[in-house]
Image: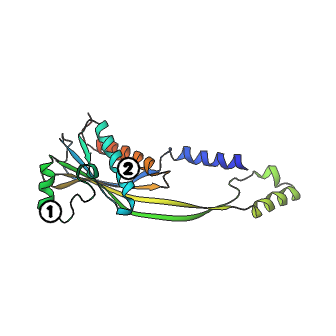
């Protein structure tokens, strides 16, 4: 039984491509072409209770930008946790300009949901020829499956949105929404998310491939 369960898990992993994060929608402003940015700020907007998650998400996105040849910094490392608290729009923009930031990529946790799902004890279906052609074979097999105990698992879904702003005009040039299903930990979540978002921005000619 354990062997079959492991095979089922392996099949799910192969079918999902070993990733828990998928893009659900995206938008690009008209007439936007990739350009060279001197310094990109990655700004996570995540509740204080998830500070470690914010650190991981910012750090991985910054690392992936640097891997593409961009100069990037995270908001927490650059400004601390209260980066723009109690500031006006003008003050915040001036602060970014003083740091030579000419583009901002946000990471926003829109929602986080937990679901408790029941996993049946048996996860496979037997062909008719194996048990169904004789009464006792059929009865024994189905009786065992019906009364075999299953178990409950708690799955977590994260719903994200990332926007990119060109600070020369302070306008939105790209927005992408994603869903992360039951990631193993915040480290793997940040790693998957960063690579996915940066690759999509290069693909959509938002960031220039270096």
Label 2 neighbourhood size at 10 Å, few (<14), some (14-19), many (20+)?
Answer: some
Nearest the viewer among 123 and 180 is 180
Residue 195 visible = yes
**Secondary structure of residue under mark 2:** helix
List x then y, in percent, for residue 154: 55, 61
List x then y, in percent, for residue 84: 21, 60
Question: Toward which corner of the image does residue 35 lie, by quadrant?
Answer: top left
Nearest the viewer among 47 and 35 is 47
- Among numbered discs 2 and 1, the one appearing first in the sequence: 2
Q: Is residue 115 left or right of residue 91?
A: right
Question: Toward which corner of the image does residue 7 lie, by quadrant?
Answer: top right
> Which residue is label 1 attached to?
89
Q: Quadrant of the C terminus?
A: top left
> Which residue is label 2 attached to?
56
Q: Residue lying farthest top?
A: 210
List x then y, in percent, for residue 174: 25, 52
């Amino acid at each position: 039984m354990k062997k079959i369960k492991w095979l089922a898990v392996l099949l799910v992993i192969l079918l999902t491509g070993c990733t828990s994060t998928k893009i659900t929608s995206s938008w690009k402003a008209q007439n936007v072409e990739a350009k060279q940015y001197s310094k990109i700020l990655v700004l996570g907007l995540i509740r204080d209770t998830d500070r470690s998650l914010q650190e991981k998400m910012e750090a991985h996105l910054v690392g992936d930008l640097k891997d593409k040849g961009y100069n990037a910094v995270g908001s927490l490392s650059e400004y601390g946790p209260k980066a723009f608290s109690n500031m006006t729009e003008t003050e915040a923009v001036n602060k970014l300009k003083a740091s030579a930031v000419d583009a901002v990529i946000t990471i926003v946790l829109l929602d986080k949901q937990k679901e408790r799902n029941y996993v049946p004890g048996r996860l496979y279906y037997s062909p008719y020829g194996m048990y169904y052609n004789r009464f006792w074979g059929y009865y024994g097999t189905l009786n065992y499956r019906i009364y075999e105990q299953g178990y409950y698992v708690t799955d977590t879904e994260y719903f994200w949105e990332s926007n990119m702003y060109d600070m020369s005009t302070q306008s939105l040039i790209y927005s992408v929404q994603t869903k992360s299903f039951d990631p193993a930990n915040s480290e793997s979540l940040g790693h998957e998310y960063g690579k996915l978002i940066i690759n999509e921005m290069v693909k959509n000619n938002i960031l220039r491939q270096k």
